Image (spheres, helix red, strand yellow):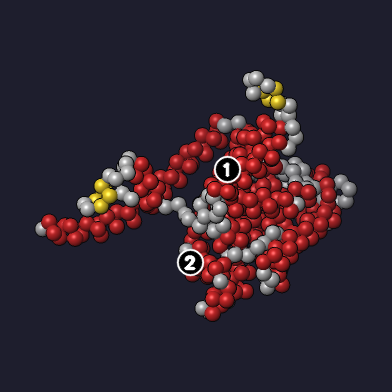
Amino acid sequence: MNNNTQKQSPLIRLDWIKERNPKLTIISLLLLGIFLYIADNRFDAYQVRVLNLCAIYTVLGLSMNLINGFTGLFSLGHAGFMAIGAYTCALLTMPVAVKDQNFFLEPINEVLRTIVLPYPAALLVGGIFAALMAFLIGAPVLRLKGDYLGIATLGFAEIIRIVITNLQTITNGALGLKSIPAKTNLWWSYGIAVFTTVFLVWLINSSYGRAFKAIREDEIAAEAMGINLFKHKVLSFVIGAFFAGVGGGLLGNLLGAINPLLFRFTLTFNILLIIVLGGMGSITGTIISAFIVTIGQEALRFLDQPFSLGFIQVPGISGLRMVVFSALLMLVVLFFRRGLMGTNEFSWDSFIGFFKNLGKGPGKPLSKGGTES
């Protein structure tokens, strides 16, 4: 009887683990919901804005990591896709009266003037437009590799920005858009961030995700295994652009005002910084890095203002915040060559095992006949 029980115990333990992990995930989502409810009602406007930016940059970082990290493409066109999503969502959510106030130099296109959509539909349309543009760009460009692909996508992003600057009757040109409805809140930004994370986890663990990773590791070997390189590259590029467009829509309706200068190539490099710091090819690392970079830049903002160290008064130096932040990032990169997480991902088993091992000193027996290494 005892022998049968011992033989069945590994299976029982495996079933318990399979049941435990979904429960822990549901509990963590409930805790996130409770935190968002408290933050939405108790935090001030500045703190809520920073939390929103953390979630938005999580969406943007994950979308770029799909292209650059998991598929191995060197794309620098994210700012262009964000601009498409931001302008589309803003124009589709603005009331007619607000559109008339913005377009005072030249009247807005009459068809666009009368279209007003709910916020979720506007986000979806913005993402679809960005994905469509990515498909049109990707068809000729994704046959390039390495630095050539990066330069080409960077050029297309700048072309998109210039086109937006000159479409006076559609985008209001260089004047940009103001009084955009403040539709983005913690529930929308974190809800979309969670959806993006779940979708990408499912995608990466599917046959398409394995094909993306195979292309990243060795294109010749992947093609020899029967993987259609062009099809999968375009698919990754389009999906990444879709979520970039949705993230741009979230950002535009959070800021309340956008203009073409907001979507310069430096915005792409900020997102690239997030995925490099977190780990190219790590969903967990991107999420962690998005919070670290966003909160870190805000926490160091006091360096641009005069402050006292107690024994000396330090004058405010414009740009000192970014100098210190860049130096800290250099230190992190020196110690974590592949980013904070590398290509590793969070799992409940490793999380629980970490806390279990905290109480075990070196040399403490782990099981009969074995000690902790």
Residue 206 - label: 2
x and y, in percent, of residue 316 in the image: 73, 29
In the image, what residue type sits under mark 1? Ile
User: Does the rendering let one see residue 118?
Assistant: no
Q: Nearer the viewer, residue 361 or 184?
A: 361
Local packing at callout 2 (Cα closer than 10 Å; few below 14, some 14-19, many 20+) is few
Circle nearer the N terminus (1, 2): 2
x and y, in percent, of residue 216 in the image: 57, 67
* Residue drawn at point x = 32 percent, y = 44 percent: 362
* Residue drawn at point x = 74 percent, y = 43 percent: 257
Residue 2 - label: none
In the image, what residue type sits under mark 2? Ser
Is mark 1 in CB contact (under 8 Å) with mark 2? no
* Residue drawn at point x = 89 percent, y = 48 percent: 105
Please give the residue where the numbered disc 1 appears in the rendered image. Answer: 292
Local packing at callout 1 (Cα closer than 10 Å; few below 14, some 14-19, many 20+) is some
If the image is split into quadrants, where does the N terminus sit? bottom left
x and y, in percent, of residue 72 in the image: 59, 64
Q: Nearer the viewer, residue 168 or 203?
A: 203
